[in-house]
Image: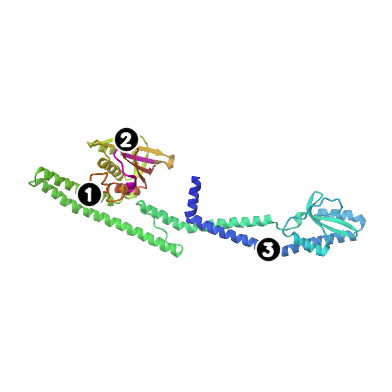
């Protein structure tokens, strides 16, 4: 049932399938109309042709039998059977006679033949168990059956018409599939390129050829990619300037605070404020900093997580438990990925401390699913805090947002998880937030393994 729902959804939403079905329905209806029209138009001429053939065979056979010498009739009948596939039998009253052949042309053939040979002419598809095209005729007072092999009557049955129509329809559907693929190919390339931009990668330029609309769309997209690249370059220059212009005064202020004649409480308060300002600037820079896929390298997941756990183990209010016995690698920027897990641990350290204690208990677990090239690695970071209201879970990923009701501290600019999501998006990873059973926040990161 799940596969059927997915298939129906793709059938409804995919442009290729919509175009294919539309062309397929149109060609099928056209073929059905054409087949019906040709069958109706050719019915009269074909019936006349077949009736004329039957009349000619019966007339010639009757004339040959009438004018031949009695001693030569046996030889004549043998020649008719061997050379022409025509057999002549005496019509008996006790013959087992089946109805005429069940074809659409038969009523017209009967009418035309009876008009020439007489209204008493009989037709049958089988006489005494022998299949063929049977027609009666008279020579004087004697009645005879003339049997033609069915191969001599070149009529087209309904099944043959349907067979031809099916072949032509199949060819038409293959053509519709080819046309749909040609129409869908530029959009598919555009979709792949747009997805690459969403993941922080620069796609290959789209070909500026084909129909005018496709050329214009691809040209505009390529121009947009170039503009975005220029914006990223300009932003990097601006960020470098901001980092220098803001942190230089902060450093000078820190020196002045150390040298000023202040009370210890005032000095500590000002130093704390300056440190917080420096942390906010660092968050802004991390959030705006681009991640280039060209810097991606194979990353040993267990080694990276062990290193992160070792680095935070020096913090007095953090207790990290790891379960990372997974031997797996993924492609990414190791510095950015370490920043992701440091941000998650810092987020748990600030807002996810175990109730009744001053310690953040953090669990890091790594699991791998799938086989060979289809492997996926899931890294889960959990705390034992109070968790987050379900109806406000999505707000955690919004920039400059803090859930102050449950997270009492206000350090930083509210960019921690937004930075995490931004970095993971450029790595093609999936981020899922949920409340841990028993209390606390659970964050799952899923990526493709190599």
Secondary structure beneath label 2: strand
| Residue located beneath label 1 in the image | 280
Q: CA distance from mark 3 to mark 1?
A: 83 Å
Residue located 84% across and 51% down the image: 95
| Residue located beneath label 2 in the image | 322
Q: Quadrant of the C terminus?
A: top left
Residue 73 percent location from the top left of the image: 89, 55
Q: Is residue 272 magenta?
A: no
Q: Classify mark 2: residues with Cα within 10 Å, few (<14), some (14-19) or many (20+).
A: some
Residue located 61% across and 60% down the image: 31
Residue 93 percent location from the top left of the image: 87, 52
Height in image: 166 above or below 347? below
Q: CA distance from mark 1 to mark 2?
A: 29 Å
Residue located 41% across and 41% down the image: 375
Looking at the rendering, which quadrant does residue 323 occupy?
A: top left
Looking at the rendering, which quadrant does residue 226 occupy?
A: bottom left
| Residue located beneath label 3 in the image | 40
**Which segment is the magenta one?**
377-394
**Of residues 394 and 18, the one drawn nearer to the viewer in this rendering:** 394
| C-beta proximity under 8 Å, tags 1 and 2 | no
């Amino acid at each position: 049932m799940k596969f059927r729902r997915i298939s129906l959804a793709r059938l409804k939403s995919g442009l290729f399938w919509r175009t294919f079905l539309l062309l397929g329905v149109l060609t099928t209806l056209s073929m059905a109309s054409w087949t019906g029209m040709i069958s109706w138009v050719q019915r009269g001429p074909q019936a006349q042709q077949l009736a004329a053939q039957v009349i000619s065979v019966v007339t010639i056979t009757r004339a040959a039998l009438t004018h031949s010498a009695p001693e030569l009739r046996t030889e004549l009948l043998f020649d008719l059977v061997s050379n022409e596939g025509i057999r002549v039998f005496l019509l008996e009253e006790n013959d087992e006679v089946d109805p005429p052949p069940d074809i659409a042309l038969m009523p017209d053939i009967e009418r035309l033949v009876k008009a020439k040979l007489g209204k008493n002419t009989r037709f049958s598809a089988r006489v005494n168990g022998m299949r063929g095209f049977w027609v009666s005729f008279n020579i004087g007072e004697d009645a005879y059956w003339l049997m033609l092999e069915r191969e001599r009557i070149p009529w087209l049955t309904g099944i043959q018409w349907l067979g031809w129509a099916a072949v032509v329809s199949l060819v038409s559907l293959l053509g519709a599939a080819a046309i749909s693929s040609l129409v869908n190919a530029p959009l598919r390339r555009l979709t792949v390129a747009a997805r690459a931009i969403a993941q922080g990668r620069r796609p290959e330029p789209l070909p500026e050829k084909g129909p005018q609309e496709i050329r214009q769309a691809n040209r505009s997209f390529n121009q947009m990619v170039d503009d975005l690249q220029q914006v990223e370059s300009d932003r990097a220059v601006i960020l470098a300037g901001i980092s220098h212009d803001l942190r230089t005064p902060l450093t000078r202020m820190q020196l002045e605070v150390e040298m000023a004649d202040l009370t210890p409480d005032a000095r500590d308060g000002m130093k704390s404020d300056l440190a917080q300002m420096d942390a906010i600037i660092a968050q802004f820079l991390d959030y705006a900093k681009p991640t280039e896929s060209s810097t991606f390298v194979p990353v040993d997941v267990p080694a990276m997580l062990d290193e992160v756990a070792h680095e935070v183990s020096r913090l007095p209010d953090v207790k990290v438990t790891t379960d990372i016995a997974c031997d797996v690698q993924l492609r990414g920027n190791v510095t950015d990925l370490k920043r992701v897990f440091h941000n998650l641990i810092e987020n748990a350290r600030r807002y996810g401390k175990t109730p009744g204690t001053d310690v953040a208990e953090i669990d890091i677990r790594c699991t791998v699913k799938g086989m060979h090239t289809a492997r996926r690695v899931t890294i889960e970071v959990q705390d034992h805090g109070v968790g987050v209201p379900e109806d406000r879970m999505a707000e955690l990923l919004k920039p400059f947002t803090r859930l102050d009701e449950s997270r009492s501290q206000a350090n930083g600019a509210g960019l921690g998880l937004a930075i995490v999501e931004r970095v993971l998006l450029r790595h093609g990873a999936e981020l899922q937030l949920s409340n841990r059973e028993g209390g606390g926040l659970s964050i799952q990161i899923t990526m493709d393994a190599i």
